[in-house]
Image (spheres, rainbow, N blue to C red):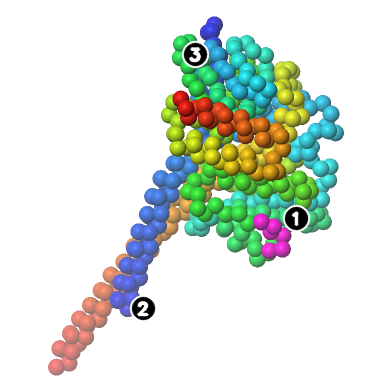
Amino acid sequence: MASLDDLKKRISSVKSTQKITKAMKMVAAAKLRRAQESAERGRPYSEKMNNIILNLSSGVSDKENAPKLLSGTGDDKVHLCVVLTADRGLCGGFNSNIIKKAKSYFQKISDTGKTLKIITVGSKGYDQLKRLYQDKIIENISFKESKNANYFDADKVGKIIIEKFENNEFDVCTIFYNQFKNVITQIPQEQQIIPLKTEEKDNKSSEDNYEFEPDEDEILGNLLPKNISTQIFKAMLENSASEQGSRMSAMDNATRNAGEMVDKLTIEYNRSRQAAITKELIEIISGAESL
Amino acid sequence: MSEGFNIDIVNPEKSFLSKENVSEVVVPAYEGEMGILKDHIPIISFLKPGIIKVISGSEEHNFYVEDGIVEFKDNTLSILTSSIFDIKNANKKHISDEIQEAEKELNKDDLNDQKRFLLNHKVEILKSISIN
């Protein structure tokens, strides 16, 4: 059995860990509220953008000449995967869930003999992927300096993707991120952004005959790159809300576990203290008896 | 029936302005200023740098935008833009910074005509704001 001193030290160390996790939980909770708000406030923009694009793309009559961002290059050989993760750890399964999802996708790609290229956004994703996929990672972007997810950063990522697309470096682009459902549930998502997947919907809205100024093609050509940035921004917002939520529940668990551990150690400490006292008493009594 | 229509201005971070019963909106569309009244036909267009004028009754609001998309449908005007500010609480410093930036951009050689035109236009508008 550990000595009393050792137990005392362990108790105090667990207690100070508990203090840290508790503080981290509080911070995450405060940040979560803000992140959640901005995720919600950002939704109208991406929804409206999506709507307009849907309306536009259903109006495009000849698919042949449609912008490549919409219809694709016609090839399916090179896949670009953009993996969005956090810059910090200690947030439960947040980062590894995205990585797991991404890895199973990577496996699928390489099984079918296609070429894989990876861009990681956020340093944790890079750290986890670089061991297995070092040669596949073509870019590693990190926004450690910016406090909150902002559109400016998303636009930067979007521009990089578009530039690579225009240089014919890939055919299909998919992004990976965590969708924020609630504090305990975050769903890892894969979303294909190039070529854009437009769900076939009932032809209700395409009946509205829009007037376009300038013409459709030009609008689409201008809108699609913007949409890429918007989708990335949406993913970043969802991600930051998920990160904080995930961290909050992870830290909550850690605090609780530390509390349980303190309880257990305290009991052990008291037991061994009593055992020591009893031992001492027995020694004294038997010593007195033998006299 | 109300006399006006609804306007929603959103930027990526939040909903910037949402207003009902607006009687007229003038937007700096790609091919010139465009005034929109109730029951306009559905239209999608771009914005170039300029001033959005929102008129409801006797009130008039002015906003500066740099780019964006307008969609009008079912008496709802949606404006998606990444850069917008209210001229009333505009920051003089911010404006002059923007002007400088744009002028610096203008001095680059590899500009095409379209871009040059847009930048010139932007400088012009911003200067006219900062005077007032």
| Residue B97 image point, x, y percent | 50, 39
Chain letter of disc 3 in the image:
B
Residue that numbered label 3 is attached to: B56
Q: Are marks 2 and 1 on the same chain?
A: yes
Foreground of the two, A277 or B63: B63
The region drawn magenta spans: A134-139
Task: State how far apart marks 2 and 1 are (Cα).
Answer: 55 Å
On screen, residue A180 versus residue B46, left or right, reads left
Quarter that holds the C terminus of chain A = bottom left
Looking at the rendered structure, the kind of residue marked 1 is Leu
Task: State how far apart marks 1 and 3 are (Cα).
Answer: 54 Å
Looking at the rendered structure, the kind of residue marked 3 is Ser
- For residue A8, which quarter of the picture? bottom left
The image's mark for residue A12 is none
Which element type, helix, strand or loop, lies under badge 3?
strand
Quarter that holds the N terminus of chain A = bottom left
The residue under the point 72% across, 60% down is A136
